[in-house]
Amino acid sequence: MPETQVLGSANQGSTVTSAADEVFDRIVRLVHRNLGVPAAAFVVVTPDGQYLPGAVGLPAEAQATRHFQFEHPATALVVASRTALVVEDTELDERVVDKNLVRQLGARAVAGFPVEDGRGTVVGALWAVDLAPRQWDDEDLATLSDLAASCSGELRLRAERERARRAEQVAFRAHQRAQFLLGLSERFAGVTTIEEVEETIAEVVGTGMGARWCSLALVDADRRHLRYVTVGHQEPGFPDDMRSARLDAPRPDTAVVRERQTLFYRDHTEMIEAYPAMAGIGLMSAGARSFLPIIVEDDVIGVVICVWAETRDHDAGTAALETTVSRYVAMALERVALLEARRRVATTLQESLLTDPPAVAHLDIATTYAPAARTDQVGGDWYDAVVRDDGNVVLMIGDVTGHDVSAAAQMGQLRSMLRALAWSDDGSPAALLTRLDRANAELGPHALATAVVVRLDHDVEPQGDTGPDGQPERGYTLTWSDAGHPLPLVLRRDGTVETLTSRPDMLLGIDPGFPRTDHSTRLLPGDTLVLYTDGLVEQRGVMITDRTEDLVGVLADLHGESTAGLPRALVRRLVGHAQRDDVAVLAVRARVPAPSGPPSDDGPARAERKVAETLKDLGPARRWVDDVLESCDIGSEQRRTAMLLSSEILTNALEHGTGPITVRVEVDDRRLRVGVRDGCTRPPVLQAPQPQDLSGRGVQFLERLASRWGVEQHLGDDLVGRHTSLGDGKTVWFEIDRTATPLTGTVPVVRRSSPATSSIPLVERVLPWTRDEARRRRT
């Protein structure tokens, strides 16, 4: 910007048609009064003409517009010579006789002194104009010279102010850019998943570049396709069938991968002109678009697409920011892939040590392990169950301090030592923990850990009076010892929750000689023991006692949940998506046996249960049937078939029948029989449901999976079972021969893998390929 453009900007601002300036108007008024001239002016010569920032006594038009367009202005003489021009009679001086100053204003005597800008360049002159010949005395000329110097000083001052303002703007923009780059570094430094990369890109291009939408696309490992991974910030109208494209497709995003250069289009029309195939796909914005390559090891692994809502040009500032953003995205994707690889290694190590629980007669055991949501965080949580030769069971759960691969490795060593001790040593839980603590100190790994060991001793003979009608029953003696671990819980069969209160002993790894204590209680048929690690109840900002109370409430609310689903239900209800620590849960339920005992020479095993007239009792009823069948030595595959059929006839009775409802199980050495009675005489009907129908397949299951099935109608005086009152009704029953091969087939138990934190596998596939290919090219 020329420094003369500061003219007229002091107070009122200059325009093209008016260059009046209050400061310079004041100076020319001083010329007018002190020299006694009828007119005075400060004239600036520019390529557009002559401007008069200060003027007095000029014709009305010139005084209003402050602009002349003269071809040979007298001011040009002063500018060219850089000296004053003093004329006592213009008619006698050929230098000005033909100038517009004389012809237009009728000036007969003029005196003009040069005015310089801040760089010392003469840009104009300060004029004193008299309409009659005049002899300028030395005092007049000195005054005019001083006032011209004042004009020069004002211009220099304004130029310095303008330079200072521009410097301040440059510094401010530089500060903003530095702050933005610093923030950019901080934002990308903390990303651990590809979703976080996408969120950070959206924030950066929105705040730093003003873009409205953004997308992230990654190149497949085969280098043949470009796939979009963006979900939440993509431009509306982008069709799903374009989220994957071959790299040779005529599109700007694939062209970036091929050409390794940023593409920018000031508006949608410009992009269509370059790539006609992009026309008519329903994109929302008609504004500018930018396609940025993400380069790692000399290969483009992806593209960042920025979309603005308005038309804009691709300036140098935007280009610099785009380059910086693409570099940070590349580094963030490399970090994400590295962290995910580390996590998978650690999680695989940890899960390989967490074996499936053993099948134990008369016990229903279920476990779960949920790793922390942080990508590179794995912990030292573990659980285990060991069946001794005498049939007793040792359960254990623990947590090694730390959240890394080292903690997982230490966990594996402690677990293996405790597992061997539990299998080979008939000691109590306290004795096992004492020996483990000594081995940890003397053999390694010198880990600091918490643990609970529980021993379940099955009663040899029924005892007590806790069974139905005050009869003795065969339960378990539960003995436990706690090394600084969260206290075990027992979900009693009546739905109440009991905390196995005891004073925890010292943690493992502090004092191997510390004495440890055993505690005992009873575990009756139908009771469920729950062991867990602290990740289930710890939450930042909440007291541990409050979280433990929440766990007790949730466990009571899950009274009807199956044992297999209980551990995951606890994690889902108490932790959810806010998980910050690993969680391990071990649930063990003592099965409810047939009251008559297993089938024998004295007769078949029989059991009967009244079912509450609500679907909430469906799960507990099915679980009871499974317990009775298991106590009669029915294999797991036949039990699975029986559970499916029992669920169907129970559901039919609860939804379409009337009370009272009872379920009766009978098992002998040839077959098992399950029957459900309700108060409705209407028999089930064989239906042909459509694939989209959610019901109507129960009779088809009976037809195909049962060895036999049928319906018995009951008269009003027909009494079936001790829970059934007089009245009409029916019993739907099925039988399965014990020698029959289960028609459901063998269903392999597949260990549930840890949930992936994000859609990382694509990044994991791309980056290793890129590095290997780069190494191959270098060699």
Image (cartoon, helix red, strand yellow):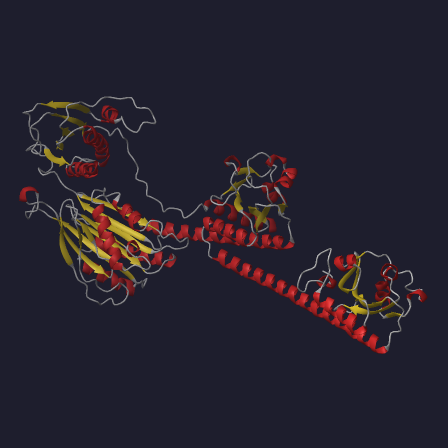
Determine which quarter of the picture holds residue 257.
top right
Q: How many marks?
A: 0
Would residue 671 be visible to someone looking at this image? Answer: no
Determine which quarter of the picture holds residue 256.
top right
Q: Is residue 564 above or below residue 26?
A: above
> Residue 297 appears at what percent x and percent y?
57, 51
Would residue 567 be visible to someone looking at this image? Answer: yes
> Residue 303 appears at what percent x and percent y?
56, 46
Q: Is residue 20 above or below residue 240?
A: below
Which residue is at a point 51% across and 51% down the rendered structure image? 201
Which residue is at a point 18% across and 27% down the rendered structure image? 734
Q: Nearer the viewer, residue 164 or 134?
A: 134
- The quadrant of the picture occupied by the N terminus is bottom right
> Residue 378 appears at what percent x and percent y?
37, 54
> Residue 565 appears at what percent x and percent y?
26, 43
Q: Nearer the viewer, residue 284 or 188?
A: 284
Which residue is at a point 78% across and 58% down the rendered structure image? 60
Q: Nearer the viewer, residue 503 or 429?
A: 503
In the image as oriented, which residue stretches furthest toward the bottom?
139
Q: Nearer the viewer, residue 294 or 182?
A: 182
Determine which quarter of the picture holds residue 224.
top right
